[in-house]
Amino acid sequence: MNYIGSKYSLLPFLEKNILEFAGPKTAPTFFDIFAGTGIVGHRFKRLGFRIIANDIQYYSYCLNRACVGIHREPTFTGIKKDISCLTSSLPPDGTDLVLGYLNGLEGVEGFVYHNYCPGGTSGTEYPRQYFTNENGKRCDAIRLQIEEWRKSGKISDDEYFYLLASLIEAIDKVANTASVYGAFLKHIKSSASRPLKLQRLEIVPARKPQKVYNEDGASLVDRFPHDILYLDPPYNHRQYCTNYHVLETIARYDNPQLYGVTGLREYSRQKSALCRRKEALNVLEDLVRRTPARYVFLSYNNEGLMSEEEITGTMERYGRVELRKKEYARFRADIDRENRKYKTNGVIEYLFCLRKSRAEKKGITT
Ligand SMILES: C[S@@+](CC[C@H](N)C(=O)[O-])C[C@H]1O[C@@H](n2cnc3c(N)ncnc32)[C@H](O)[C@@H]1O
């Protein structure tokens, strides 16, 4: 998924540097407290770490609950028989069968169609074009079917989140936006006109399910033991709740009241203090102070709200800090390419690596 701050392209950099400090044998539990797409937890799970993942956004919880939380391929045994009766050709396994069935459903005019598509919003105060009519209706049909299967107990929790995660990834690929949902485009772009198609997820096998949460990170950081705390907070004022509100609503499917041209949902409880210059450093200090982890790694860059010196100064109160750097191409929504002028194309990506002293130093709270 093309997500603000995604670490997909930085995975080799993270892996190399983090493994220099701690490995799955010496520091087995890795807490990804701002998990976003879940790509970091997914990679470190593959390396043999036990993952705890968390994010304040529910669509992110769904992605992580599936790609990180699930420890073995789902079988969809509870619905396989029902679907097999309806299809003539039998795909090799339960997942292909279920995804094929959902991809073939006839569209339904539901919440997505009525609120985010041109057909459903034409003639209203706020016509919107986040998806084509066809994709909006398909999304509604699939989302309703997933919910019905869950309510009737035909799919397990793992299977439910697997399908939701697959839907979130698929609908994002056909969104008629410049990458984020702060606005939609006036004309349907070519990727948005392709049909919505659920695809298989890559499940990393593990001995046990991994823990996944949907809370403010500050309320979780000292709740259970972990060896590594990985912090990948928002870098600037852009709130994820307003940039990904459509995915949040599709994940929740809770018929919210929508507001204004872009159709925002209520988001006050998901606003992040890390997006505010005056609060970010205090929040960071609080997390570093309270975590029981021996190692804290923080991803950030040279254009973020907190400066390199402020972060180093804060983290150094709790142990020895090393800073690793990498030149990196900046995240750009399509609209940025047209409207924004940047001094440089690249930014410097930071990884602050803190080896925490055992004893908490006194007199440091701000
Ligand atoms: C830079 S992104 C993480 C990207 C992620 N590492 C990836 O590669 O996909 C920051 C994430 O922090 C989450 N977030 C912001 N404030 C939070 C908070 N107080 N508690 C938990 N998550 C928060 C956002 O929802 C967003 O998904």
Image (cartoon, grey):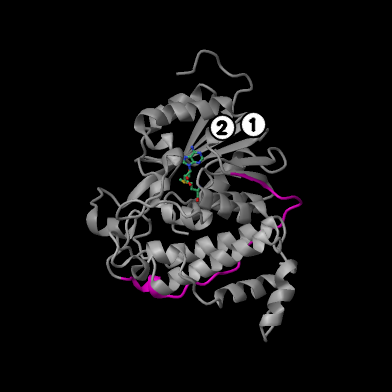
Q: Residues within 10 Å of mark 1 (few under 14, many from 20)?
A: few
**Does residue 329 sit above or below 216 in this rendering?**
below
Query: What's the amino acid at mark 2?
Result: Ser
User: Is any part of residue 180 visible from this angle?
Assistant: yes
Query: What's the amino acid at mark 1?
Result: Arg
Q: Name the residue under label 2.
A: 219
Q: Which residue is drawn at 67% across and 86% down?
A: 88
The image quarter containing residue 338 is: bottom left
Q: How crowded is mark 2: few (under 14 residues within 10 Å), some or many (20 or more)?
A: few
Q: Which residue is drawn at 70% across and 59% down?
A: 156
Question: Which residue, as the protein is rendered here, is positioned at the far bottom?
Answer: 88
**Does residue 86 sit above or below 59 in this rendering?**
below
Q: Is mark 2 within 8 Å of ligand 1?
A: no
The image quarter containing residue 275 is: top left
In the image, taking residue 82 as reference, residue 349 lies left or right, namely left
Q: Position of residue 192 (x, y in %)?
A: 39, 70
Judge whether residue 36 is colored magenta.
no
> What mark, if any, has residue 223 been given in the picture?
1
Helix, strand or loop status at disc 1: loop
Looking at the rendering, in which quadrant would you find the C terminus? top left
Judge whether residue 189 is colored magenta.
yes
Tag 1–tag 2 contact (CB < 8 Å): yes
User: Is any part of residue 320 visible from this angle?
Assistant: no
The image quarter containing residue 104 is: bottom right
Q: Position of residue 141 (x, y in %)?
A: 53, 69
In the image, taking residue 286 as reference, residue 220 lies left or right, namely right
> What mark, if any, has residue 1 been given in the picture?
none
Specify start and end residues of the magenta stretch as a single range. Answer: 188-213
